[in-house]
Amino acid sequence: MASEKITSGGKPIAMLKVLNPFHIWALGVGIVLVGEFMGWNFTVGKGGAYASLIACWVIGLLYTCVAMIDSEVTSTVAAAGGQYTQAKHLIGPLMAFNVGLYLVMAYTMLCAADALVVGDLMKSGAEVMGYANLDTKPFVVLTVAFLAWLNYRGVFATLTLNLVITFLAFLSLIVLFFAVDPLHQGVVLQHQALLTDLPYGWIGVIASLQFGMWYYLGIEGTCQAAEEVRSAGRSIPLGTMGGMMTLLVAATITWFVATGLMPWQYLGQAVTPMYDAATLLGSSQLQLMLFVATAFAAIASANGCINDASRAWFSLARDRYMPVFFGAIHPKYRTPYRSVLFLVPIAVSFAFTGLLDQVITFSILSGLLGYTFMTFNMIKFRKMWPLGSIHRGYIHPFHPIPAITLLTLCCATYFATFLGYGASLLSIMAFYILASIWFVVRRYKYVKRADQFTMPWPRPKGY
Amino acid sequence: MKKNYSPPKQGMLGQIFDTVLVLVLVYASLMFPLLFKAAEKAENAAAVAAAAVKSTWESLGQNAIQQAQWIKLGYDPEKAATLINSRFDYTIDPMMLIVTIVVVAGYFMFMLKVSDKQYREVIAEKFDN
Amino acid sequence: MGFWDIIVYVAWSLSAVMLVWMVVDSFMISSQYDEEYLMSSREGGEDDVVHGVHLEEGNQ
């Protein structure tokens, strides 16, 4: 049999280019939107309701910078792996290895958290229907297994599903907004009575920046689809910027509705604040809608995370940064199927550690490290290949102001993480430092040097 | 002109080992902060126990509308008191802050430096040969 | 056995079926296709629009 194996016939295998800007929007917004249904409200606990709104906009600015920078670089360096490939071409192998790890860790851990949410929703659903203590484990596993299966079988169906359920979840927020009679204060919304001064002062505002990332974390994952989207140079900036606008609207609506209904001390620790908001309105239809929407948002997020994490892991393997075995593409479905499969047990095990706090902190911090990298990345990109030296699909305005703003806001968010999770911060940094040392000492010897540079560009200035 | 670097091929066993190693590192860094958490929890429990006096909406500083929303959410003053009285501690330990800044900044500096060295090698091989 | 017990079993079995299907499929692919072919994808693919064009050779 071995002699009859099917070979290339000279033509290399490639992923399918089937996606359009709407899929990109769905990938980006799908990952994030669950954050509007839960998680964002921890900002309220950290610093009060106004702190949460400030965090929403300040971190919104951070992500607008991220989206601008990312759009320019990705429209030029379009490859699966996204920021990882950018790092490889602009900063160097060790940075690229780290960025690849940030992506894999941020998305795999977020996927675990999403699956846990689905499990918990099933449990509370069962409780409402009169069955206490439902075991959540089978639903956590089912979520991950089903989405991995979908991802394994092809990217088009995967992201089309995301498009549908993300859109429905977003729609539910709009419906909720109109249901609270937003123009008439005091009828349903009680902002005057519920909003208080900053309970911790301005330090609370800074502290809330960490969970403020929850409003948008994952939007930058859009560039992982670069090898599967038609005309990436146009679609990715379009999908990402459109996604960012959707999220800014959704985040502001979310804050407005929730803080007009719940005292901040409750909101700051609520597990499913939007569902609670619907409960307070006393309409069982709204309750059901928010229940389903929360589940959809969590599933869409887990789905996008599997998509992005597997592309990042695949790209690391394709360059031999990680074991080359994972760099295979399925000949029929054209997906990085081994990476998809490999991440299933990992995501499930993260979900079952019972360390949700830790897992989420790891995810957020990995994202933050990635944004910090983007600032160096952008500055070097304009220096090494000045405007005009290569064709860029999109050029963002006001350089270097977005990069500098981004770096400043990243520093503030590190400080926020230090305030809330100092020990975790150091422990996670220790992981990346050890992994870096391991890469330099042991792993980099398996990597082909010149092959890492794949863009048809002229020699960079200064090298 | 230097000869291109040609890497060794890694066997299956090595690949498995490398994969497992990364996973072990991840789990270790997830577990590590638990050591600190245990001590913190004991302190918190003591603080909550100390604050357990009879609460009313007035003593908790909740106005009429806030009270109404708490009640709709299924809370009485006793239950709400735990949420209202638990507060984050934002005192900054300057030593820890300095250590953290050094670690994060040092990490990025180390990374940029090593990356730059490796990058020059890549560019040299790509464009010189 | 109540409704929810059945749901739990269904969830476990569905997960198992999908996982087993993926594992079996990936083994079948490995046995049918040449490893070199599966690994032959190249970064950036063969896209035309995306990649930068050298100024010297390209437009302008």
Image (cartoon, coloured by chain):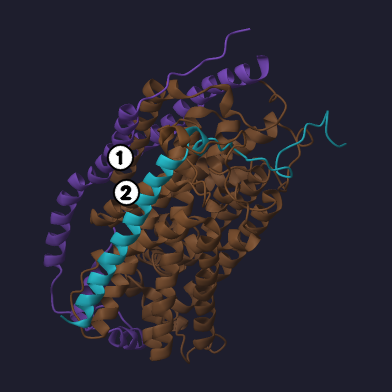
Chain colours: A brown, B purple, C cyan
Which of A98 and A9 lies nearest the eye of the viewer? A9
Q: Is residue A280 above or below residue A90?
A: below
Chain to which the residue tagged by mark 1 belongs: B
**Residue name at image x 35 percent, y 54 percent:** A360
Of A461 and A376, nearer the camera is A461
x then y, percent, for residue A8: 56, 36
Quarter where residue A89 is shown? top right
Q: Residue at x 39, y 55 (%)?
A: A110
How far is mark 1 from mark 2, CA to CA? 8 Å
Residue at the spot of label 2: A346
| Residue at point 26%, 84% (across, down) | A128
Which disc number belongs to residue B23? 1
In the visual, does C11 lie left or right of A436?
left
Q: Position of residue C26 (x, y in %)?
A: 39, 47
| Secondary element at tag 1 | helix
List x then y, in percent, for residue A101.
42, 40
Vertical side of C59 occupied by A186: above or below: below
Query: Above or below — where is C38 with respect to A442?
Result: below
Disc 2 residue crowd, few under 14, some 14–19, many 20+, Cα 10 Å: some
